[in-house]
Amino acid sequence: MARAPERVTDESSEPLMRAKPLPRRLPVAGAPPELVPARMINEVLYCERLMYLEWAQGEFEDNVFTVEGRSVHRRADVAGGELPPRPAGAAPGSAGEPSAAAPSAAPAPPRRATGRRADRDEEANEPAPYEARSVWLSSERLGITAKIDVVEGDASGRLLPIEYKRGHAPDVPWGAYLPERAQLCAHVLLLREHGYACDEAAIYFAASRRRVPIAIDEALIAATEAAAARAREVTRAAAIPPPLVGGR
């Protein structure tokens, strides 16, 4: 049951109502789990201390950014749709089949191609031939797991994973910072592991109302795999990393 709001008063104002925060807890990792979430790949590149506090110690509290982020994800978090059939001869991933909550939903009718999907400045105006939301994938061989916000696909089986972000698209080379690009790279690697053709990803920045393409190359794959290994290493050390100093 939610706590009742706390009544706050002072000498210069009428009584105010202040809601007590309800902390959200993540599962506590007593030892490094075998599968590193793609989100923790993002965080270990951004701040190892933050990754450790959230993943190893299960510490998490909402702030204005996380609340806004959940609002941006409200549609993507409603699982449904389906992925296209895997290309003939493709091997399934090492940890089972990819899943969306409503795998029996009928795909949207095919549409005429209008250029690369990742380059659209608005969230999709026309439905992709296939679309699945809140897709969970895992791979024991890769040692990673992820919930992908949205996966679009065409009849050939080629997929595009899309991550929703609350802020503005940064004006940087590669379209996004390394932590976000590594998170998307993990999504691409998981889709490939499950037998799909996937050579790029995209981030939809809600504040900019813009979808930014994310290229996947060997350097990014290496950085992503190294980040997953580092997340396990930091967690295994069982010691909180020092805070960042001067943004480093």
Image (tube, rainbow, N blue to C red):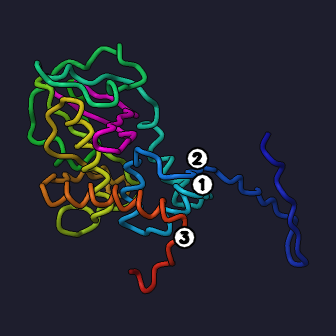
Q: Position of residue 224 (x, y in %)?
A: 27, 56
Q: Nearer the viewer, mark 1 or mark 3?
A: 3
* Residue, disc 3: 240
Give the spatial CA distance, label 1 vs label 3: 12 Å
Q: Position of residue 209 (x, y in %)?
A: 31, 52
Q: Residue at position x 16%, y 46% from top?
A: 200
Q: Residue at position x 23%, y 43% from top?
A: 189
Overall secondary structure of the magenta stretch? strand
Q: Is residue 104 magenta?
A: no
Q: Which type of secondary structure does the marked residue at label 3 adopt? A: loop
Q: Position of residue 161 (x, y in %)?
A: 26, 40
* Residue, disc 1: 58
Q: Earlier in the sequence, mark 1 or mark 3?
A: 1
Residue 187: which quarter of the image?
Answer: top left
Going by the numbered disc 3, the residue's amino acid type is Ile
Sort mark 2 into few (<14), some (14-19) or many (20+) by Cα contacts within 10 Å: few
Q: Residue at position x 29%, y 31% from top?
A: 94
Q: Earlier in the sequence, mark 1 or mark 2?
A: 2
Marker count (numbered): 3
Going by the numbered disc 1, the residue's amino acid type is Gly
* Residue, disc 2: 27
- Marks 1/2 in contact by CB < 8 Å: the verdict is yes
Quick one: which residue is furthest to the right in this view?
11
Give the spatial CA distance, label 1 vs label 2: 6 Å
Specify start and end residues of the magenta stretch as a single range: 130-154
